[in-house]
Amino acid sequence: MTRRLALGCLSGFASSGLAQLRGQDAPARVKVGAAAIDVTISDGFDLPRQALLDWVSDCARAVAGYFDRFPVDAASLRIVMAAGRRGVFGGVSLGDGPARTGIRVGQHSTELDLKRDWMLTHEMVHYGFPSVDREHHWIEEGSATYVEPIARAAIGNLSVERVWGDMVRDMPQGLPEAGDQGLDNTHTWGRTYWGGALFCLLADVGIRKHTDCRKGLVDALRAINHAGGNIQIDWPLKRAFQIGDRATGGKVLTTLYGQMAAEPMPVDLADLWRQLGVRSEGPHVAFDASAPLALVRAAICS
């Protein structure tokens, strides 16, 4: 099975306890719809245990909202304390067997730190897509990078302005550079995370244009997951895209993959933001309701 990583380093778990936690309390069960997440928390946090469990519940609720259910029936989560620190430092999710995640959280983290966190939601989004061959790692990380803020905005944990502002700031990292050989053959950090996210954005826009905003990437990803595609299952990428295309009544995913997989496809981001009606105003963004694709932009975060 493909091993999926957030920005944190897997090596940090080798000694800190992904495989084994010491001094841990008995696992707590967090329910999200019909699914259950068994959560184990190491000792030593300033925060009460319930605050950490509430954070897990919020992240799971955001992901369940996007996929129209939590993407696996059961998962386990281990929260490892990082001594003397604040914030969330990274995680790893595995699907070779039961879906499971380990994540590091600073000893002195506050409830605000947890509310601002994106990493645990990112990790849970991974549950909703099948494991694919290593050269396609960009779609695993890219879809999690793209979906995470949209899912958080839907439950009120992130503003729509922040979603688009962060895209405008970060999406250029996914553009091809000199020597690029397409998403399947260029395994840099930028192309893996943000190149994959750029693919998802273009697919979302393409599907919504094709369907007059009746459907979007969310419908394709839900269909893939509901057909059995999740982190515990190995699939060819083309199978996943074919299911997503059938659900959205076109061939946007398959066509875009053909354009971006083996060669660099230029993307004029400045023009895309203009068409979507996203204007940068210093550190903030404003929306132009008269832009050609303003309805598409609104639908993406509806």
Image (cartoon, rainbow, N blue to C red):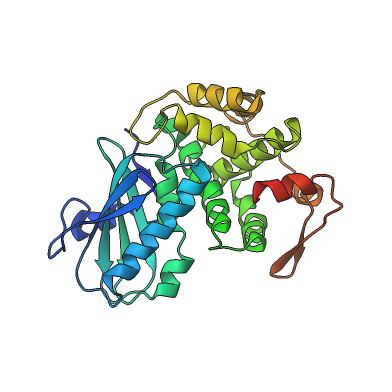
Q: Nearer the viewer, residue 68 or 96?
A: 68
Residue in the picture at 56% in, 47% down: 146
Tell me residue 45's x, y (percent).
Answer: 26, 73
Give left or right: position of 257 versus 119.
right
Looking at the image, residue 160 sits to the left or right of residue 2; the answer is right
Q: Quadrant of residue 78?
A: bottom left
138 left or right of 217 in image: left
Residue at the spot 20% in from the left edge and 57% down from the top edge = 27
Residue closest to the eye, 14 or 242: 242
Rendered view: 300 above or below 225: below
Which residue reaches farthest front?
34
Q: How many marks?
A: 0
**Image x and y of residue 193, in percent:** 51, 46
Instruction: Give the percent coordinates (x, y) of residue 286.
Output: 76, 63
Would residue 202 be found to the left or right of residue 196 on screen? right
**Image quadrant where residue 205 sits:** top right
Say if residue 154 shows up in the picture: yes
Quadrant, the N terminus:
top left
Q: Residue at x 25, y 62 (%)?
A: 80
Regarding residue 183, the answer to whether it shows in the image is: no
